[in-house]
Image: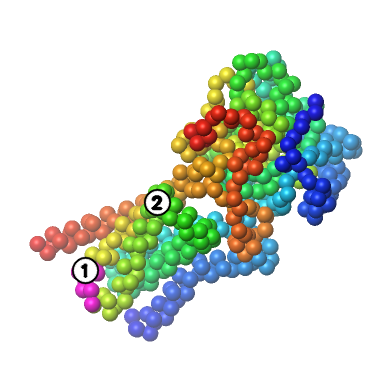
Amino acid sequence: MLIKFSKKSDIKPSEITSENNFLARRRFIQATLISGASLLSPLSGFAGEPTNNIFANIKKMSFGINEKLTSFEGITNYNNFYEFGTGKTDPAQYSHLLKTEPWTVEIMGMAKKTGKFDISDLIKPSELEERIYRLRCVEAWSMVIPWIGVPLSSIIKRFEPNSKAKYVAFETLVDKKRMPGQNSKFIDWPYIEGLRMDEAMNPLTILAIGLYGKPMPNQNGAPIRLVVPWKYGFKSIKSIVKIGFVENKPQTTWNQLAPQEYGFYSNVNPNRDHPRWSQKEERRITGESGLGALFTPKIKTEYLNGYAEEVAHLYKGMDLKQFF
Amino acid sequence: MAKKTRNTYKYLVFVVCLMPLAWLIFAILSDTLYQTRLMSVDPVQKFDRELGDWALIFIILTLSISPIAELSKKKGLIVYRKIFGLFGFFYVCLHFLSYVGLNLQFDMIELLNDISKRNFITIGVIGFILLIPMAATSSKKIIKYVGGKLWKKIHFVIYTIAILGVFHFFMMTRADFTRPTIYLIVILVLLIYRIVTRSKLLSLKK
């Protein structure tokens, strides 16, 4: 099936040879060489068979934006992943405890096929793609991340959800020993999230298993996480162990914690402030530290994080200030 | 204690009080020159938080000096109350400057929006404004001019400011309320101590 994407997020010919893309490509090649040689990838096949390494064969997508990528160091050293602690650097510090092999994901609910599946069985039938997306955190900072993943729709289709399945619910692993932040009781673990079926099926929504051409770093939600680029970052649930097809709108963690602050949709919307801060602008985290980062001018936040052309139709006729 | 040694201690305390600021400056310069990440890749937020935290710590220190002096029977300690108080004000000023300058990038319309719309900012700004008359009446000359009674009244407001500060901290927190809870408990203990000792003093006078 040929899916036609709008021009807005396509890479313009002028961008193709930009330094950024060049550097990203070079990093990508280096990364694949490294992971191909040492088979660091949790999804790779038998040692000595680099052709089995799925990270060696990634389709470059036309998704991409005329913005500078956040460095790998930036992406991996500034995370909200409360399973490892509430500090921004806690995940980088403690996530080595997480064991991602073996990893099974349970598919459940209103679908023809359900059951527990090894992550490689889940991913392998789909072609890996690189998608460069903006990530806008509800806390008014943002990054640009080159994810590696597969469209969620390609996976959903294989399990043949029935007509009762109106929503997709997700759950993160609970493992207090390996996720020390889960000893804190302010969240009723597991972390849970959900999407409406049409949001889940939208071509922009992906399940990511890596970034910068490498397997997903633990602090970014290894081994498999959701990425929904037009919603605030907390919707993109990490380290997924359960995916369920459900009839009613599922509960979501932040909505449970503070319903007046975090809605089910949580679409990026500069016109609806968070009660405690403005959402009109954002600080772009480039990965640079020091005075350069301290005095970087803020940028305007775009409606639906700049993906309105691709997803605005999902919310036609809805008042997004009410359904925030 | 001889006046000379007392002065030496004063200077020493003064230098120690500047250490948090010195650390922040060192950290941001190190990040700039040596690509360390001491202030993380989002130093704006780090400056906001660190300066606010130190402001509260110094305000709490100010509150605890006279109970410590009373309980340890070392009345000389009381001279440090003023230093800590003024440093509290100093770090509140820097915290405000960091919020207006680094976070809002001097967008004054956004500042007015924040003050009018967002309770935790309103509370923070009220606390900041209340601190100004206290800082302004800290010199010995002014204490004499104002008179001890009025001066004490003005400076009892520090308890209100401390509580406003902690509420400001509570209300801006998304997760993990450990620190503001600890600060609140310490402030309440100090306040109860003050009320109890005051009422004892009053009943003795009667």
What amino acid is labelled 1 in the image? Leu
Give the position of the N terminus of chain A as an image quadrant.
Answer: top right
Comparing A287 with A21, the one in front is A21
Q: CA distance from mark 2 to mark 1?
A: 31 Å
The verdict on residue B206 being magenta is no
- x and y, in percent, of residue B141 in the image: 28, 79
Give the residue at mark 2: B116
Mark 2 surroundings within 10 Å by alpha-carbon count, few (fewer than 14), some (14 through 19), many (20 or more)? few
The secondary structure type at the circle numbered 2 is helix
- Is residue B30 found left or right of A17 in the rendered image? left
Residue at position x 80%, y 55% in the image: A19
- Is residue A250 found left or right of B170 in the rendered image? right
Residue at position x 54%, y 24% in the image: A249
What amino acid is labelled 2 in the image? Ser
Give the residue at mark 1: B150
Visible residue check, residue A88 = no
Q: Give the magenta range.
A: B145-152
| Residue A309 location, quadrant | top right
The prevailing secondary structure element of the residues shown in magenta is helix
Discs 2 and 1 carry the same chain letter? yes
- x and y, in percent, of residue A283 in the image: 59, 53
